[in-house]
Amino acid sequence: ITATYRHSSLTTRLHAEATNGVQLISLESLGGDHEAVGENMGKAMAAWLDVEWMPQEIHVQMGIRVKNTYVQCRTDGKDDVAEIMTQVTDDLYENWAEYNADAFVNAWDCGNYVADYLIAKSGSETCGCSTKIED
């Protein structure tokens, strides 16, 4: 059973059977400027990595890859946080040779940050274990 509720311009879909009544995350509130959202997310991830470890140019490079993957996902019509997180992780993993020598994290750490970022910036409820989002 799918029920759709309209609140101003935001459409929230509840998939009662598939999600046991859990509200799915909508990325509509992020707007249509995927380039700007991706840029901000990539910079935020690089800043987070700098705080967690130490400032490194490799964090900027990883942020650029994250931005590009996000923009491609959104351009392709993907709006599911888990799907975007997985694509970001896969793209980083496939190119990990570029980052491996200097990065203190792995592709999944970055993918998880992307999910936390998107959930927080969409205005959805986060949990206490979510990564602090650097602005």
Image: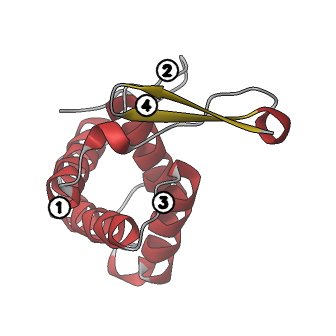
What is the spatial separation of the Cα atoms under label 3 and label 2, in whole angstroms? 18 Å
Most foreground residue, 88 or 94: 88
Answer few, some or many: residues within 10 Å of disc 3's Cα (few below 14, many 20 plus, some between 14 and 19).
Answer: many
Q: Is residue 1 left or right of residue 86?
A: right
The quadrant of the picture occupied by the N terminus is top right
Amino acid at the residue labelled 1: Glu
Query: Which mark, residue 131?
Result: 4
Q: Are marks 4 and 2 in contact (CB under 8 Å)?
A: no
Q: Earlier in the sequence, mark 2 or mark 1?
A: 1
Q: In front of the other: label 1 or label 4?
A: 1
Answer few, some or many: residues within 10 Å of disc 1's Cα (few below 14, many 20 plus, some between 14 and 19).
Answer: some
Q: Position of residue 10 (x, y in %)?
A: 39, 33
Q: Are marks 1 and 4 in contact (CB under 8 Å)?
A: no
Q: Are marks 2 and 1 in contact (CB under 8 Å)?
A: no
What is the spatial separation of the Cα atoms under label 1 and label 3, in whole angstroms? 15 Å
Amino acid at the residue labelled 3: Ile
What is the spatial separation of the Cα atoms under label 4 and label 3, in whole angstroms? 17 Å
What is the spatial separation of the Cα atoms under label 1 and label 4, in whole angstroms? 23 Å
Answer few, some or many: residues within 10 Å of disc 4's Cα (few below 14, many 20 plus, some between 14 and 19).
Answer: some
Q: Earlier in the sequence, mark 4 or mark 3?
A: 3
Query: Which mark, residue 35?
Result: 1
* Residue ID for mark 3: 84
Quadrant in the picture for residue 53: top left
Q: In front of the other: label 4 or label 3?
A: 3
Most foreground residue, 73 or 23: 23
Quadrant in the picture for residue 27: top left
Amino acid at the residue labelled 4: Thr
